Amino acid sequence: QKEVEQNSGPLSVPEGAIASLNCTYSDRGSQSFFWYRQYSGKSPELIMFIYSNGDKEDGRFTAQLNKASQYVSLLIRDSQPSDSATYLCAVNFLGDSSYKLIFGSGTRLLVRP
Amino acid sequence: DAMVIQNPRYQVTQFGKPVTLSCSQTLNHNVMYWYQQKSSQAPKLLFHYYDKDFNNEADTPDNFQSRRPNTSFCFLDIRSPGLGDAAMYLCATGPPTSNEQFFGPGTRLTVL
């Protein structure tokens, strides 16, 4: 069973803090990992992707991947109220079409002013 | 701007009355996807196309069909909508060189 697990939240952080969002997945052979942001009533928007173990930084966002432990995380530095949204983790599982992603149900982030 | 467009944005239909949702793209991506997303749930892949090659998910109900007449357009047909089919339907596209996906704004389907 291919699964992507996320804590539903809400994760509440004060403005300016670091928000840490976590995701675990069921298949150690998975190759590519994505983070999407979804505002209420809107469609998912790609934030970043990561393929290799370690950290990948893009502005205030850092994705961290640990394939041995089968988790991927997203750090948001200097959190802003506009970051309040649901964050979806998505994984391309080994053996699936390379174009297929399995999504988690997301973690809702609330940034308090 | 290159984009993914879905029409209509909101669709109301009656129980059992066929409905068609459309998606178009100006990104010239080879891959197109249809997802169903219910409240507080993960987007669930229904089908995807690589060009004309159609890939149906094993658990997609027969009630859902799709057509892709050309690179730019893709349609989702729901032959006999039930109350459980009320959801947001998301179209996405992706280039052949990676598995990034770019979503349209979605169509929210209500079944009365």
Image: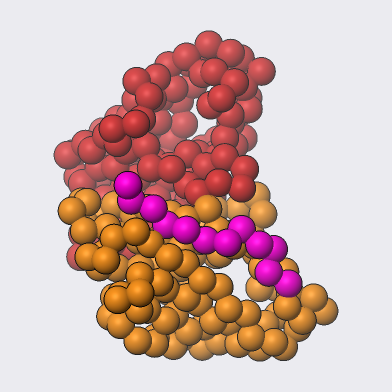
What percent of the width, then of the height, locates residue B99? 28, 61
* Residue B1 vs residue A61, the one in the foreground: A61
Rendered location of residue B105, percent (x, y): 54, 50
Look at the image and tell me in which quarter the N terminus of chain B lies. bottom left
Q: Is residue A82 left or right of residue B46?
A: right
Instruction: Pick out the residue farthest to the top.
Output: B16
Q: Position of residue B32 (x, y in %)?
A: 31, 47
Instruction: Inspect this view and state whether residue A49 appears.
Output: no
The hue of chain B in the figure is red
**Is A24 in front, or is A60?**
A24
Boundaries of the magenta span: A1-12
Chain A: drawing colour: orange
Vertically, is A24 above or below A73? above
Q: Indicate the position of residue B28 as horizontal and vertical percent values.
A: 28, 55
Q: Is residue B31 left or right of residue A83?
A: left
Could you tell me if residue B80 is visible in this image? yes
Left/right of residue B81 with respect to residue A113 in the rendered view: left
Q: Residue at x 35, y 74 (%)?
A: A69
